[in-house]
Amino acid sequence: MATSTFTWPDAPVIRNAAKGYKAGGDFADLVIVGQARKWQARKLFSFDKTLQKNFPGYVVEKLSQVNL
């Protein structure tokens, strides 16, 4: 994380995603969900079935799954 070769837009999110990746998670999915949670999104819409499965109740495919 401390290198001049790479620039991280949000180091805490990247750091948490790296920890989750080491535990067997998908790095890209962890970054996406981490950013959504950082910005206090109540739900995240995605057609990615694996993302929905890994974050049930938070990642949804349909607007009808959200209480507005």
Image (spheres, grey):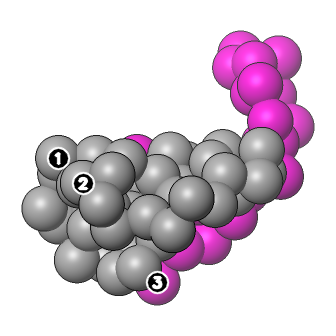
Q: Is residue 30 visible?
A: no
Quadrant where the C terminus is found in the figure: bottom right
Q: Report helix, strand or loop for mark 1.
A: loop
Instruction: Check contact, mark 1 vs mark 2: CB within 8 A.
Output: no
Q: Which label was assigned to residue 23?
A: 3
Q: Report helix, strand or loop for mark 3.
A: loop
Q: CA distance from mark 1 to mark 2?
A: 9 Å
Residue of label 2: 62
Q: Residue at image x 75%, y 27%? A: 8
In this rendering, the count of numbered labels is 3
**Residue 62: % across, % down:** 24, 54
First in sequence, mark 2 or 3: give its number.
Answer: 3
First in sequence, mark 1 or 2: give its number.
Answer: 1
On screen, 24 above or below 33?
below
In the rendered structure, the answer to whether residue 41 lies left or right of residue 49 reads: right
The residue segment tinted magenta is: 1-28
Q: CA distance from mark 3 to mark 1?
A: 24 Å
**Residue 9: % across, % down:** 77, 25
